[in-house]
Image (cartoon, rainbow, N blue to C red):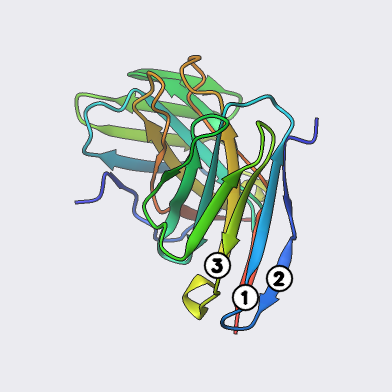
C-alpha cells in the first residue's frame, strides 16, 4: 500500500499561472482533505470531500477549486496563483464513522509563487 | 478563542529526558484525540490516538486526555534524537464528522 500520494513534490509558479495538485489514496477511504501549512499558522483546511461526488469548503477556500474525480483521487486547482498561496499543501484521507476518526496524510507539495 | 491551543514554542531537551507536551481546547463535543509527529519536510504521521478520557501508552509514548479540564498531554520517556520533530495535537467530534481541529504544533529537539 502506498497510502496517500501527492504530485508534484515541488513546484514554482509565476503570479497568475494555474496548476493542479494531484492526490490519490489506495486505502479505500471515503473522505479526502486538502490542507495548507504555513509557519506559525498550523494546518488549515482548504476543502474536503466527505464522499465521492461531494465537496465542501473548509477554513480557507478562496483562490482554490477541487475535484473529487473518483473514490481514489482528489485534486486541488489554483486558477490564478498569488504569492499568498506559497505554502506546503497536504492531502489526507479517512474513513469517518467507523470509530477510527483520524486522517492519514500524504508527503506534501511545496509550492512557491513568485 | 481558537478551538485548539498549543503553545508553539520550541522545546530543547537532553537525550534521555522526559518530554511533556499539551493542548487545551474549547469544544466540549470533541471525542477523539490524536497526536501527530511531523519530521522536517515530511507529512504528519499519526503517533497516538485516544477516544474520550483516559490514558494510552505505546512504548515510550503516553497520551492523556482530561475531558473535564479540556486538556490533553503527550509524554515521551527516554527521549532520543530520533524524536526530534514537530508534534501536533488534533481532535474531532466523530460520529461521522471527523473534520480535525489542529494545534499549531510544538517543535521538539532532543540533544545527544
| Outermost top residue | A98
**A80 or A101, which lies in front?**
A80
> Which of the labelled discs sits on residue A87, or is there none?
3
The chain letter for the residue carrying disc 3 is A
Which sits earlier in the primary sequence, circle 3 or circle 2?
A: 2
Locate residue B96, reporting x and y percent.
Answer: 41, 21
Which sits earlier in the primary sequence, circle 1 or circle 2?
A: 2
Locate residue A98, reporting x and y percent.
Answer: 50, 14
Give the residue displayed 58% in from the left and 30% down from the top: B60
> Which of the labelled discs sits on residue A112, or is there none?
1
**B108 or B8, which lies in front?**
B8
The chain letter for the residue carrying disc 1 is A
Horizontally, is A6 left or right of B65 in the view?
right
Which sits earlier in the primary sequence, circle 3 or circle 1?
A: 3
User: In the rendered image, is residue A51 in sight?
Assistant: yes
Per the image, label 3 sits on a secondary structure element best described as: strand
Tell me whether the residue at label 1 lies in contact with that at label 2, contact meaning CB atoms closer than 8 angstroms.
yes
**B3 or A31, which lies in front?**
A31
The chain letter for the residue carrying disc 2 is A
Quarter of the picture holding the C terminus of chain A:
bottom right
Label 2 sits on residue = A11
Amino acid at each position: 500500500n502506498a497510502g496517500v500520494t501527492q504530485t508534484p513534490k515541488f513546484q514554482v509558479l509565476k503570479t497568475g499561472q494555474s496548476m493542479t495538485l494531484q492526490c490519490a489514496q489506495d486505502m479505500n477511504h471515503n473522505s479526502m482533505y486538502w490542507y495548507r501549512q504555513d509557519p506559525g499558522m498550523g494546518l488549515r483546511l482548504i476543502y474536503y470531500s466527505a464522499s465521492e461526488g461531494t465537496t465542501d469548503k473548509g477554513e480557507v477556500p478562496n483562490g482554490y477549486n477541487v475535484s473529487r474525480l473518483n473514490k481514489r483521487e482528489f485534486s486541488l486547482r489554483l486558477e490564478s496563483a498569488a504569492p499568498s498561496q506559497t505554502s506546503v499543501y497536504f492531502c489526507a484521507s479517512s474513513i469517518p464513522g467507523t470509530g477510527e476518526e483520524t486522517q492519514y496524510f500524504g508527503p506534501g507539495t511545496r509550492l512557491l509563487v513568485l | 478563542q481558537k478551538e485548539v491551543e498549543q503553545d508553539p514554542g520550541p522545546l530543547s531537551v537532553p537525550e534521555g529526558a522526559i518530554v511533556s507536551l499539551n493542548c487545551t481546547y474549547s469544544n466540549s463535543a470533541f471525542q477523539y484525540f490524536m497526536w501527530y509527529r511531523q519530521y522536517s519536510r515530511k507529512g504528519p504521521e499519526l503517533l497516538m490516538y485516544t477516544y474520550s478520557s483516559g490514558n494510552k501508552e505505546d512504548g515510550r509514548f503516553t497520551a492523556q486526555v482530561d475531558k473535564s479540564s479540556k486538556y490533553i498531554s503527550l509524554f515521551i520517556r527516554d527521549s532520543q534524537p530520533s524524536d526530534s520533530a514537530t508534534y501536533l495535537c488534533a481532535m474531532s467530534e466523530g460520529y461521522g464528522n471527523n473534520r480535525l481541529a489542529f494545534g499549531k504544533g510544538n517543535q521538539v529537539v532532543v540533544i545527544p
